[in-house]
Amino acid sequence: MATVLLVGFALLLLVNVPVSFALAIASLGALVYGGLPVTLVVQKMTASMDSFVLLAVPFFLLSGHLMGRSGIAKDIVDFADSLVGWLRGGLAHANIASGTLMGGMTGSAVAEASSTGGALIPPMIAKGYDAPFTAAVTASASTIAVMIPPSIPMIIFAVVTGVSVGDLFIGGVIPGIIMALALMITSWLLAVRRGYPRGKRPSLGSIGRATRASIWGLFMPLVIIGSIRYGIATPTEASVVAVLYALFVGRYVYRTIAWRDIPSIVQETAVTTGVVMLMIAAASLYGLIVTREQIPQAAAQMIMDITRDPYLVLILILGVYLIAGMFLDLGANVIILVPVLWPLVRSLQIDPVQFGIVTVLGLSIGLITPPVGASLFVTCGIAKTNLLDGSKAVLPFITALILVTLLIIFFPGIATWLPYSAKG
């Protein structure tokens, strides 16, 4: 059954079958081959979506669409520019800073790359930045969106493993900030070497005006993190609060969302949610076969034959993530790889929150590595540069993100201190 599953899945991907359908068809073939009842397909797929935690997915996606439609992105970009735009390569730093702030609203790297890229890539090119560099820095900054809460991949990880979504959300805050700093240092080094321009040093008044203009957008991540951090709401309940907040801001503060716009926004959210849910449902069949064939145990034994050191094991896992990220979407990789690796991680007593952060960060690098780097595809399209040049330009940023991941591997407190201190 395992051979039918893995070979069938690989062949389907080679002929460009979408990942969720490839998972479902390969799993169905393996079930039939193994003589198991086909009724398991419906039962397992339905049961996998019967989860209170998964309700957070459509609500966070809806809040992101509402905030995106409200037009708050420009104010966030202006605020970020007022803080860091005066540095050498200022617009690149503003790009990363706004990506960090926007990530707290969208929870999606591709959505963040699209919104920030549309606002900043054209003016960066106009001011003398190379097109491949602008695409690379924007795509790299988008990876922070899956680390700063809310994060859809973290929700998927929590469903697969049973780890607290709240712990993962809070645990992602410090790593997300470190990612931003690492990318800004990389940008500064490249900007100095290439002589990119710096902006004018802002006055306190202009910073104040930019802060006031963007305060509604800046407050949203605080609503999400604060309500979870202090036990006011569960992550699912916080997602509903985020929707109400985003609707209020778009409808009554910015006045850019009319009631007639709501159906189209909900429709966009439903389509995106359907993609995520279908993948989770299809992966449940995959998980059934993986468990039945004892693939996790075999994988664990293979790795433990090499080393039993938790640090080296996590480095090996990171290597697997970097390779897998080149060929599959982040969410699909979480669903496919984590169930296989989870028993090994638990047997070595690796902290589950640390493993979750390493997983999401390690796999997010795949968003900027070809041939399936979704964020890099988006930003190269906006910058009107080819993927090869964009891939070369993104290498220093990939190196920076790998170093951040290694930092979290060797210093787990970066990921675990905040969520566990929240519990006293």
Image (spheres, rainbow, N blue to C red):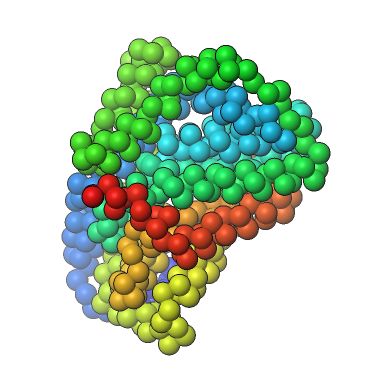
Q: Residue furthest bottom?
A: 305
> How many callouts does the rendering have?
0
In the picture, the quarter occupied by the N terminus is bottom left
Above or below, 171 against 411 in this view is: above
User: Image quarter for residue 337?
Assistant: bottom left
Q: Where residue 179 appears, x then y in whole percent?
A: 53, 48
Which residue is found at the position 77% from the left and 32% from the top? 197
Q: Where residue 330 appears, x then y in whole percent?
A: 46, 55
Q: Is residue 329 left or right of residue 129?
A: left
Q: Where residue 16 appears, x then y in whole percent?
A: 52, 58
Q: Is residue 316 left or right of residue 288?
A: right
Above or below, 17 against 202 in this view is: below
User: Image quarter for residue 38?
Assistant: bottom left
Which residue is found at the position 20% from the left and 50% from the top? 51
Does residue 391 appear in the picture of this structure?
Answer: no
Does residue 104 appear in the picture of this structure?
Answer: yes
Q: Where residue 77 appears, x then y in whole percent?
A: 56, 27
Q: In the image shown, does 71 or 272 lie closer to the viewer?
A: 71
User: Image quarter for residue 365?
Assistant: bottom right
Which residue is found at the position 32% from the left and 31% from the top? 223
Q: Is residue 99 left or right of residue 157?
A: right
Q: In the image shown, does 145 or 314 lie closer to the viewer?
A: 314
Q: In the image shown, does 221 or 340 lie closer to the viewer?
A: 221
Which residue is found at the position 37% from the left and 41% from the top? 150
